[in-house]
Each structure stands twice: as C-alpha cells, then as structure tokens.
Amino acid sequence: MTGVDLEFSADVWEWRGPAPFYWLRLPEEGCDLVRAEAAAASYGWGAIPVRARIGGTEWETSLLPKDGGYVLPLKVAVRRAEGIGEDDTVDVAVAIAPRDGRAANGTGPAC
C-alpha cells in the first residue's frame, strides 16, 4: 500500500448491535489528521473513505465518527485472514482516499 497517512496500534473491541461488529479506535493524534482531511475526503455522514492494511491484508472501508474521534470497522474476512480475535492489539496502516478516488462498489485505485 502506497501513500500511508497514518500507522497506529489499537485494541480490537466488539459492538453488539443487531449483529456483532468489531472495531479499532484511532488514537487522538490520528483523529487530528483525519479531521484535517475530512472536507476533501468525506462522502457524507462524517464517513471518511480509507484503504487499510493489517499484516498482509489490505481492504477499502470508511472511518466513522464516534465519541469525538474515529473508528475503523474490522471486517470478518480481515480478522480471519490475520487470525485476529477480540481484545487483540493490532498494527494498522491507513491511507485516506479522496472522494473521487474510490468507486461506489468499494473498488478503486490504490491510495
């Protein structure tokens, strides 16, 4: 993945809504960077499209606002591929994608 904007370590946590979802919380200094890029990247509701990498797995997703910061959803396929469980600490690389750099179906040029 080229153009990495942010690298951090975070603990995996679960939100139990109608279906369980797993998340990583961005550190505050990472949130400052995301806020600075938000106007150029957000496509609505405060969501920021990104390309993320954990280990050898890369995927496109969006950062979502939560409690004054941002969280990164952790897909089941990523957790399985990397052997990640709840409460694990993982190293993450994130590249913020401009609005026009990502197609609606989740495919688009690498960031």
Image (cartoon, rainbow, N blue to C red):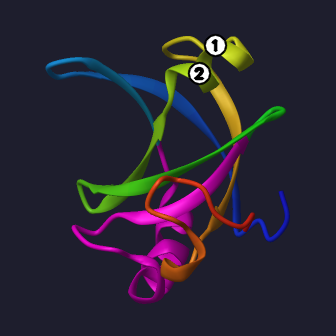
Residue 17 picture location, percent across and down: 16, 22
Above or below: residue 64 compared with residue 48: above
In the rendered structure, the answer to whether residue 96 lies left or right of residue 70 reads right
Above or below: residue 105 compared with residue 46: above
Q: Say whether marks 1 and 2 touch (CB < 8 Å).
A: yes
- The amino acid sitting under disc 2 is Ala
Q: Which residue is mark 2?
A: 77
In the foreground, 10 or 21: 21
In the foreground, 86 or 18: 18
Residue 99 picture location, percent across and down: 48, 79
Q: Identify the secondary structure beneath mark 1.
A: helix
Q: Identify the secondary structure beneath mark 2.
A: helix
- Dividing the picture into quadrants, the one containing residue 94 is bottom right
Q: Which residue is mark 1?
A: 80
Q: Please give the name of the residue rendered at 43% of the width and 61% of the height, measured from the top-left corner.
A: 104
In the rendered structure, the answer to whether residue 66 lies left or right of residue 10 reads left
In the rendered structure, the answer to whether residue 38 lies left or right of residue 84 reads left
- The amino acid sitting under disc 1 is Arg
In the foreground, 56 or 28: 56
Q: Which image quarter is the N terminus in?
A: bottom right
Q: Please give the name of the residue rendered at 50% of the width and 29% of the height, measured from the top-left corner.
A: 75
Above or below: residue 30 compared with residue 74: below
Residue 39: numbered disc? none
Q: Please give the name of the residue rendered at 46% of the width and 88% of the height, measured from the top-left corner.
A: 40
Q: Label 1 to label 2, Cα distance in Å?
A: 5 Å
5 is within the stretch colored magenta: no
Residue 87 picture location, percent across and down: 51, 16
- Dividing the picture into quadrants, the one containing residue 9 is top right
In the rendered structure, the answer to whether residue 110 lies left or right of residue 78 reads right
Report the span colored magenta.
25-53
